[in-house]
Amino acid sequence: MSRKKVNLAFIQNASTRRATYKKRVQGLIKKTEELSVLCGVDACTIIYGPNEEGPIVWPSSEVEAKRIISEFKRKPEVYQSQRKFNQETFLSESIKKVEDKLLKLKKKNREIDVGKMVSDILNGKSTLKEINSSDLGDLLWVIEDKIKSIEYRIRVTKEGK
Amino acid sequence: MSRKKVNLAFIQNASTRRATYKKRVQGLIKKTEELSVLCGVDACTIIYGPNEEGPIVWPSSEVEAKRIISEFKRKPEVYQSQRKFNQETFLSESIKKVEDKLLKLKKKNREIDVGKMVSDILNGKSTLKEINSSDLGDLLWVIEDKIKSIEYRIRVTKEGK
DNA sequence: GTTACTATCTATAAGAG
DNA sequence: TCTCTTATAGATAGTAA
């Protein structure tokens, strides 16, 4: 026969569970994409499979990361105002001294200004909640971009000049 | 009549689009929860609505954040091995020097070892891909945890000692 | 385990109040 | 605009090869 009403509980049988998992992941990703396209909103779903390496993510990072990062670069004033606001923040003397030094070095690299925002957050100079044009998902992509920027900078610095 | 086949494209009519949005958000969240429960996997969907303050997120952060962070604290050895692996990485001389100093200061604060991992990532000593027990979603919570840790540390440092 | 099938359940587009 | 209804498109549980 075909289809019982689903009982919303963990599926005990392992192979049944795996089969259901595969089908539903497909469905969920499709639904996510549809909502995004039909309604013109950003949507993201992340699934941490039982024995897979990394999570399944929609949208796939490549294209979407570029879109969001370019958006950030288009409105630097949001970041600027955050920065100003956070100059009130204080750090312990010794840590502050070293971080200021690091800051100066980083300022030389104008091309990584987007990554700077993330750095501020992690140095406690800003918080997620204060960055209103950002959000959890955006932050994610920016982090990846920053990593690429830093890796690039390391490579360039090492190769000469 | 009822239901046409959906044309997968941005819905031009604003009110139709809104109606569809509301229905589909509900459906998508439900599907996410079902996948999670039925198959015992972690899943997350984030929707950035057209004119809403923050994104709609499943699962709601509070409980889930705590669960994941405590999980990280239960297995510090994963982070340790990552750290060892990444000692091969090099930075430009001037940046490295300053960062080493910063690192020493930070080592004093044993209680923020989880946040340290995130810091390493942003300093280019590690990448998202190398942290296999972590993943995009986990990283998110860790970042928030780190921010709290730093804020706490700043407060404590300032109050005395 | 992986298709492929299909009966049935579920989501939801459209219409009505 | 929201809510309710209903017909139908779409998702998928169970089964078979």
Image (cartoon, coloured by chain):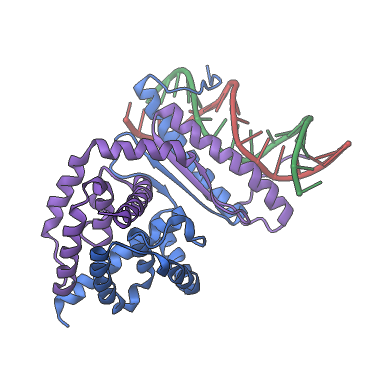
Chain colours: A blue, B purple, C red, D green
In this picture, residue D4 sits left or right of residue B158: right
In the picture as drawn, the residue positioned furthest to the bottom comes out as A161
Q: Name the residue rendered at 16%, 46% in the picture.
A: B80
Looking at the rendering, which quadrant does residue B12 occupy? Answer: bottom right
**In terms of depth relative to the viewer, which is nearer, B157 or B90?**
B157
Q: Name the residue rendered at 39%, 23% in the picture.
A: A16
Q: Image height check: is D8 above or below A130?
A: above
**In terms of depth relative to the viewer, which is nearer, B100 or B5?**
B100
**In terms of depth relative to the viewer, which is nearer, C14 or B156?**
B156
Q: Name the residue rendered at 52%, 46% in the picture.
A: A32
User: Picture coordinates of residue D8 (x, y %)?
Assistant: 70, 36
Q: Image height check: is B113 above or below B75?
A: below
**In terms of depth relative to the viewer, which is nearer, B32 or C5?**
B32
In this picture, residue A104 sits left or right of residue D2: left
Looking at the rendering, which quadrant does residue A79 occupy? Answer: bottom left
Q: Quadrant of the C terminus of chain A?
A: bottom left
In the picture as drawn, the residue positioned furthest to the front comes out as B160
